[in-house]
Amino acid sequence: MNKFLGWPLIHHRALPWACFTNHFSGFLHWGYDFWDPNDRWFGLNPTARLKGDGYIVYPDPKRNRVKNSVRMISTRDGAQDFELLKLLADKDPVLAYEKSRRVASRFNDFNWEPENLENVRREILEALDAE
């Protein structure tokens, strides 16, 4: 799993699940809004070996803001999933880890199907909603 530009978005979304499964307290994406001022390609240089690594938002100097990307949205969704897993772990830790392992057991062992992740997420929400 990694956050490279050319890799499927499920990598971004499932990364926090693997962090949870493996008892990490979180995930630091260093340099969220750090750009090389000399990189006119903003991480998209066609000659770069790994395109986009490190760039999940892009500068918008005209508005003094950042522009979102689908990678950022997927990263955000994964962070929200991580928080749902933590809530479920407070209620039923065995169930929370069972659910998280169905998405990502390790960083190199995870289910590539987005439908699986969405189904497990729905099950987590239902478990949190149950009395």
Image: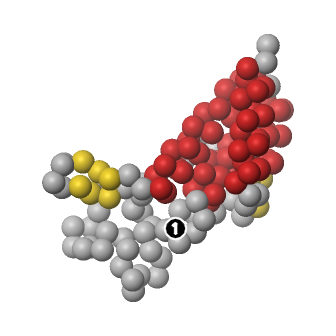
Q: What residue type is labelled 1?
A: Phe
Residue 48, horizontal then vertical, whole percent: 41, 82
Relative placement, left or right, of 53 versus 118 is: left
Q: Is residue 124 left or right of residue 13?
A: right
Q: Mark 1 points at which residue?
A: 4
Q: Percent from the top left, x then y, of residue 10?
A: 63, 58
Picture coordinates of residue 9, whole percent (x, y) = 58, 60
Q: Which image quadrant is residue 100 in?
A: top right
Q: In which quarter of the image is the N terminus?
A: bottom right
Residue under the image location 36 percent in, 79 percent down: 45
Q: Give the answer, above or below, for where 2 lies relative to 119.
A: below
- Give the residue displayed 60% in from the left and 33% down from the top: 83
* Left or right, 60 with reference to 125: left
- Residue placed furthest toward the front: 115
Q: In the picture provided, is 117 more to the left or to the right than 12?
A: right
Q: Can residue 76 be seen in this view?
A: yes
Tell me residue 88's x, y (percent).
Answer: 72, 28
Quadrant in which the C terminus is drawn? top right
The furthest residue to the top: 131
Instruction: State the SS at label 1.
Output: loop
Q: Quadrant of residue 90?
A: top right
Colour mode? secondary structure
Residue 89 can be seen, yes or no: no
Q: Residue at x 65, y 52 (%)?
A: 14
- Give the vertical position of 74 relative to 37 (above or below): above
Question: Exactly how many numbered labels are in the figure?
Answer: 1
Q: How crowded is mark 1: few (under 14 residues within 10 Å), some or many (20 or more)?
A: some
Vertical placement of residue 74 versus 128, above or below: below
Residue at far bottom of view:
47
